[in-house]
Amino acid sequence: MFKRLNRMQIALTIPDHGDPQAAAVVQELLGGKFGELSTLNNYMFQSFGFRNKKKFKPFYDLVASITAEEFGHVELVNNTINLLTKGTTFTGDPDITPLQNGLLSRNTYQYIATAQTALPGDSMGRAWTGDNVFNSGNLVLDLLHNFFLEVGARTHKMRVYEMTDHPTAREMIGYLLVRGGTHALAYAKALEIATGVEVQKMIPVPDLDNSKFDYARPFMEQGLDNILYTWSSDGDYEDIDRIWKGINPENGKKLIVKRGTPEGAPIPDLDDLPEEFAPGVDRDDYERIAKKLMENL
């Protein structure tokens, strides 16, 4: 089962004004081939279909626990995109064209379909597809694919970082560069145990350390490049410490498994957008609804 906490993995800066072009490009990190919807669904389906879970428990625990983290990554990128459209339209009579800036956005569909929130698609508007899921059932092949998926995702994050200087977007990317680096290393270490091949000698791919990115350094200073979480407080998935052990080859520090989840941060509460009829509840309706909710308590 999954337990949901009403918090995000990190706090995001709430901008006074967003950048719809940045929102469009950040969509790639959500619904692109190497986006968070792909990492989530690859690991989720692999964990659901994992054979001999008891016999190969450390490997199962690794894929299953990272699956849980990826749910939070999807949430984080979603909220980043939502904030990147903030302040780009205005409230007013329909005849004064209050959504006119949506006409100039690369992602006009965001203004039409979702009231300026994220879409399950990439930076060119293509919908995410289950064709991006790889679940062969072969342990080594799936681990190798996951390593490839993580370094591919890292490449795309680095390129999007270089495309936008919006602080909210860069905060999110800096964090995901660090956490994605831990996942790439985890799969490399798992492959080494399963095959004897020293995969971690390839890291980092691309060959540029996360410390070169200003917005990644604060998360590295917190040691988040050395930690894997179990994402369970009930003693589940703790055998990841059979794999996540020893020294981080990139910084020489000890690798740590932490039970449970990070503390997290509040989820942004999006403002009303009357020009988008969202949520479309006026004061009278709100008072009527509130009265109904309080009845018979």
Image: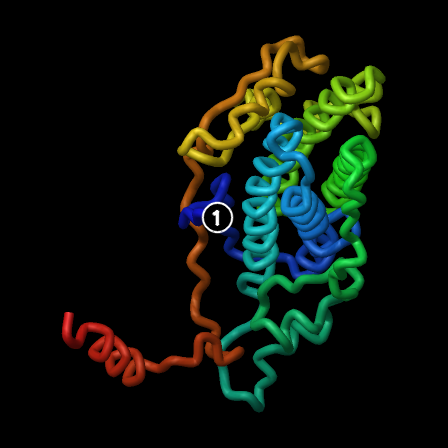
Q: Is residue 215 visible?
A: no
Residue 296 in picture, x, y percent from top left? 14, 75
The foreground one among 276 and 51 is 51
Identity of the residue drawn at 43% across and 46% down: 7
Secondary structure of the residue carrying tag 1 is loop
Please tell me whether residue 73 is drawn above or below residue 116 in the rendered image.
above
Identity of the residue drawn at 51% across and 45% down: 12
The foreground one among 62 and 154 is 62
| Quadrant holding the C terminus | bottom left
Residue 152 in picture, x, y percent from top left? 81, 39
How many numbered marks does the figure carry?
A: 1
Residue 163 in picture, x, y percent from top left? 76, 46
Going by the image, does 180 lie left or right of 91? right
Occupied quadrant, residue 177: top right
Going by the image, does 52 lie left or right of 11? right
Please tell me whether residue 257 is drawn above or below residue 75 in the rendered image.
above
Identity of the residue drawn at 71% across and 15% down: 250
Occupied quadrant, residue 73: top right
The foreground one among 222 and 274 is 222
Q: Which residue is mark 1?
A: 2
Residue 13 in picture, x, y percent from top left? 50, 45
Kindly identify the amino acid type of the residue bearing the numbered disc 1: Phe
Q: Is residue 273 visible?
A: yes
Identity of the residue drawn at 44% across and 32% down: 260
Going by the image, does 261 lie left or right of 105? left
Bin the neighbour count of mark 1 within 10 Å (Cα to Cα): few under 14, some 14-19, many 20 and up. Answer: few
Occupied quadrant, residue 153: top right
Q: Which residue is most to the bottom?
A: 95
Q: Which residue is most to the left?
A: 296
